[in-house]
Amino acid sequence: MRRERLGKKWAGWAAAALLVGTLSACGGGGKASESSGAAADPSKPVELDWLAYNSYAQPDPNSDIFKMVEKKFNAKFNVWYVDTQQWNDQVNVKFAAGEIPDVLQIREQIPKYVANGILADISEEDIRKYAPTYAKVIDEYDSSLWNTVKYEGKIYALPSVNLNGDYPQSLIWRKDWLDKVGITKTPETLDEFETALKKFRNEDPDGNGKKDTYGMSDHAIPFVLGAFGLPADNTNYVLKDGKIEFAAVQPEMKEALALLNKWYQEELIDPEFITGENTGGYWADSQAFYNNRIGLTGGGMFYHWRNKPIGEGDKGGGQYLNFKKAQPNGEIAFGVPPVGPNGKSGAPQWGVSSTPIGITPKAAEDPRKLQTILTMLETSFTDYDYYMTVFRGTEGVDWKKEGDTVVNIEDPNDDNASFKRGAQVFSMMENPEFGKKAFSGLYKFGDSVKTKGYPPVIAPAVDSLSQYSSNLGKLQKETYTKIIIGEQPVDSFDKFAQTFMDNGGSQVIKDVNEAYQKTLGE
Amino acid sequence: MQRKSMALPHAAERRNYSLLRRYAKHKYYFLMLLPVLAYFIIFHYVPIYGVLMAFQDYRIFKGISGSEFVGLKHFRELFDGIYFLPVLKNTLIINAYKILFGFPAPIILALLINEIMRPRFKKWVQTISYLPHFLSWIVLSGIIIEVLSPSRGIVNMILMELGFQPVYFLADTSWFRSVLVSTEVWKGVGFSAIIYLAAIAGISPDLYEAAEVDGISRLKKVWYITLPSIAPVIVIMIILNSGSIINDDFDQIFNLLNTNVQSVGDVISTYTYTEGIAKMNYSYAAAVGLFKNVIALIMVLTANTIARRFSDQAIF
Amino acid sequence: MKIKNRSWGDRLYVGFAYTVLILLCASILVPMLQVVTISMSPVEVINSYGFHLFPTKFDFSGYEQVFRKSIIWTAYANTIFRTVLGTALTVVLTFMGAYPLSKKTLPHRPFWTALIVFTMFFSGGLIPSYMLIKSLGLMNTMWSLVLPGAVSVFLLLIVRNFISALPESLEESAKIDGAGELYILWKIIMPLSMPILATVSLYSAVGHWNAWFDSMLYIQDEHKQVLQLILRRIVIDGTLDPAAGGGADLIDKPVNGESMKMATLVVSIVPIICVYPFLQKYFVKGTMLGSVKG
């Protein structure tokens, strides 16, 4: 009896010990690259483990787009499917278990990936040889984009352009309120802004007989900061005399905060701006604006607030429609960022830099892989029809032309039907010129309301920033809020600036400027 | 182990022999326990080597066996700077309040439900009270912002009716923690009460019948019969809850926190969120986790020791 | 005199109980109604301030968007299967762990308990767990969802203490009657433990029902994934930033993300909420004990 019990117990332990053994063996073996023998024969299709897309849905490997692309480039794709919202969690765990794709979107800071051995460097020669048009487009759009993918002098990824990032965020007025309080021209300077906001507060623009309206809330604050020369949010950089600095601690911001504090005390700013004018739903929504509480909002893009129809059946942008549903008689007007005392102005802007594409050391072992990837990229930058197919899907099935713009054909059974049919899987990135061509009506509207903006300063990524950024960002936000509502005096700004620099700020500035000078030197 | 000790001198041998006898006597119990132990070994002990990551500069491609050891670097990083101590303090204060109010609440709820004699009402109350458990903090935060709004929230409307000034609960540093504690208690009370309801259901009706004969009041029955009978479950809950002093509710605080109450509401998990999870810094995240677990373990062991001194219901 | 006093105190206490419970239920029903109402309201109602306890205008596009995905029924089936299998496994294993550990005579009981409790505080994290599942060959199977969390230390300890609180006299008298261990376990302990096993079932079922992260990590095939994961994706698709998808999505239809989110919530929690009433009969005071003795 006793032996039997002991025997069982030891069997259990033995099983566990065995497990540990297999585990460590697996950890080692997983990293060995798969057979590269097949790649030696040039007539055989090159095999690519593909993660260079947004993965909104699991694409069907038997779809027409798959077949077309595989045939065109003599390739065979094994497309990974990961949850796009939990991308990092999922992908990092797979990497750790030795599962590595050949090509991937880089949603992390490049130095982290390089340090983890996930990215292989790409020679500029290869890029210019196999994808000359692509390289030229990047050069012409913003050649500093190349700096965003460099680390210690080497290129680790293919930069991509976000066309929408070229457009600053929109500032939106209640046109009917402006009319009601007798302002005919949309305000342009800080003084004109102040006049308008005062009237919004005091002259009952919504006509309900109660003093329950305010001028603005949190979304418009960055535009006011912009009037003082900088969009100071979180750890945004600003370029001053060729040196990178943190925008948040610049003395100009003290003036800006003094003004916002004055506006808050005059009740021009909704006191509930702390919990935000967006109280739920899509980020560009402003319930305070929809509910006649404030008359000035911002932060959304031109396509959110577009108030002119393009094409048949179209009524306008999503947030504009939400607004119209809440206030059928309300009207909006696109404003311009206010001009400050020194003539400066600008709206916050995302910037054109977008998710880059990288290749892993596993792919770098076989030069055909990189060639295929670059050729695919080049084709989608030169061949408009190919671009439309891989990016949008098949004409007549996934999209159709309406007037001067492209419209999605919705599948009544599945929102993701076109992703499943392979759209957006192989496009890697959008050629901004082709994007403008396909949606000329939309971008014409965007151009008509485009204002001055502050594109983000493109600076090399440094380790110390990723270490300190979240704490510095919190410190900035907390201090700004407290100064605006008067819980801290405006003069406490100087102390804040000191604390900010002492607790990581100076370190980041030192590191980033060193790295920046290096990229300039090249 | 046992076999080796057979060769030892007489007294020890006898002791071991009796121990073996005890094992032999309980062999069926161990047979029963075996699959459970196997489960814990395979699914919990085998992967435990991951703890090493906290002491390494973990690099994905190198794995745990190949990454460089850096000692306490990540712990130093965590404790460094002006930010950590306030965050630790917030965590401890908020959780102390949550335990103080959140621990007795479900017991009281279970006792109150137990007093209800109308079966239909009782069933409805039980079912409704556990509903909030299913609402995520993302959904709840929208509702809470609305309910507590100083201009249009129902709470402030009542306050103003009663002649008070409206309070901006979510942006007021002196109120924010109360909001966290009360919403947490409200959300979890019904679901946690189920354990106590089950414990109450296990009480022998004989005890109540005897009390009935003596003509004891309801409150006294609760005090002298119900509470002592469910004490084992209460004790185990106290011990296990004591560990939660360091484990904050990330989702709740992340969704309710705003810039003005950062100083009283920022806790360890929101503080480490961007660094550990979003930025792929596995070693840092592992260090934070280990730090929290050690604190929790100390708390639980302390609570367990106290419980063992005053009752026989401790964990071990 | 005495009787009157007692009944006054009792009445006050019961009155207090009713008041508290009614207030609690009211405070819960208000947000729940709000969720249900928003799930079937058009966007202008949702964006307006104030409570929305009852729908004033109807718009079921949120539900349409959820049920448009044919995969949702497969996901429902997967979740139900997972919940049933996982809960059964948990109940059996938890009891098998709790019962021996409730025996005070068990040799080295503190050691065996500590061995289990230790795992509450030290875990290897995501990466080793993933490699374990992979090397056990459980990837892409239902087992990867039910095995790793099969026993919760917390529930095991609760059950253990519940069993040790059962009156020992029952067991002793059964032994005197010549009953064997198995008989005592099956005919006395098990029935008496029904309330706590019902609790374990409920907690485990709710946990399985709500879980999605493991399914995302371990299951690649969309047809094997669970409801919560599919629903999350629907919500994400519906509230996607248009800029991420490129130009065509910029021609927005009015975004009605909130109603869809709430519809998703309703769709996902209604079935699991319906489970509780069926377990409630096990929470009636002393029923089990009476039936065993009778």
Image: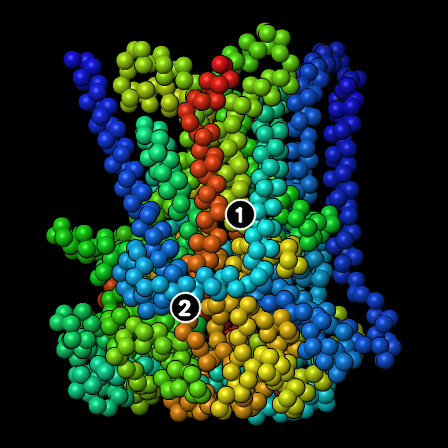
Question: How far separated are the C-alphas under marks 1 and 2?
Answer: 26 Å
Give the residue drawn at x 46%, y 80%.
C251
- For badge 1, the amino acid type reads Trp
Residue shown at 41%/17% (left/top)?
B205
Q: Position of residue C112 (x, y in %)?
A: 62, 28
- In the image, A65 versus C115, the foreground residue is A65
Q: Against B134, is B262 above or below? A: below
The circle on residue A4 is: none
Q: Circle 1 sits in a helix, a strand or a loop, which is it? A: helix
Instruction: Locate residue C293, reporting x and y percent.
Output: 49, 14
Indicate the quadrant where residue B144 lies. bottom left
When asked about the image quadrant of residue A366, the answer is bottom right
Query: Could you tell me which secondary element the residue under label 2 belongs to?
Result: loop
Residue position for label 1: C209
Query: Label 1 lies in what chain?
Result: C
Pointer 1 and pointer 2 on the same chain: yes
Disc on res. C256: 2
Name the side, left or right, on which B265 lies relative to A485: right
At x 29%, y 66%, the residue is C48
Pointers 1 and 2 in contact (CB under 8 A)?
Answer: no
> Quadrant of the image for the N terminus of chain B?
top right
Query: Horizontal placement of A298 versus C196: left or right?
Result: left
Q: Earlier in the sequence, mark 1 or mark 2?
A: 1
Q: Could you tell me residue C146's position as x and y percent? A: 62, 44
Q: Position of B156 compared to A281: left or right?
A: left
Residue at the spot x=33%, y=71% of the render?
A286
**Amino acid bearing label 2:** Asn
